[in-house]
Image: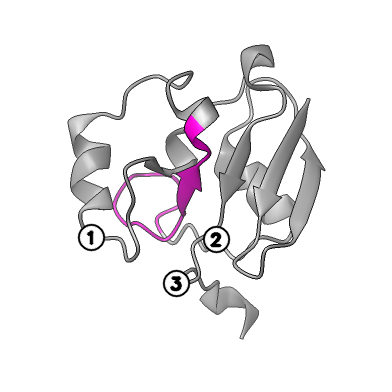
Amino acid sequence: MKIRFTTAQGKTVEAEAESGADLLTVAQGAGMPLEGTCEGQMACSTCHVVVDADWFAKLPEASEEEEDMLDLAAGVQRTSRLACQIMLDDTLDGLTVAIPAESHDMRRF
């Protein structure tokens, strides 16, 4: 399936993903600056993405724990989610998410 990332600079990057993968892993593989410090344990907000409004309602609702972590993220919007909590399946082929300008992957420095 295809996943589309919109960078903070407005560039679109397409990535191939397998059903069952999490969005964080796919984003990192596509070179997106999502650190994922807690490695998907929902103990940080360094994988914060903004889901395209057309796709947001197609995702399962965020858990209370995810909402708590999003409260700590910079640049949160109504359709914000943690990429580590989005498990991809065939219904999400074409999913489009934006990478917030505040996102930085400190592993790259």
Looking at the rendered structure, the secondary structure element under dot 2 is loop
Label 2 to label 3: alpha-carbon separation: 10 Å
Looking at this rendering, what residue extends furthest in the top direction?
91
Magenta residues? 38-53
For label 3, the residue is 102
Please state which of the two labelled residues, at mark 1 or mark 3, is closer to the viewer. 3
Please state which of the two labelled residues, at mark 2 or mark 3, is closer to the viewer. 3
For label 2, the residue is 34
Looking at this rendering, what residue extends furthest in the bottom direction?
109
Decide whether the magenta segment is chiefly helix, strand or loop.
Answer: loop
Residue 69 vertical placement versus 34 (above, below): above
Residue 19: give x, y in percent of width and height: 69, 20
Residue 2: give x, y in percent of width and height: 78, 31
| Residue 70 is one of the magenta-drawn residues | no
Residue at 67% across / 63% down in the picture? 10
Label 1 to label 3: alpha-carbon separation: 12 Å
Amino acid residing under circle 1 = Leu
Whichever of labels 1 and 3 marks the residue nearer the N terminus, that label is: 1
Q: Relative to the observer, which residue lies in front, 92 or 86?
A: 92
Disc tally is 3
Label 1 to label 2: alpha-carbon separation: 15 Å
Whichever of labels 2 and 3 marks the residue nearer the N terminus, that label is: 2
Please say if the residues under marks 2 and 3 sit with CB atoms less than 8 Å apart: no
Amino acid residing under circle 2 = Leu
Q: Which mark is residue 72?
A: 1
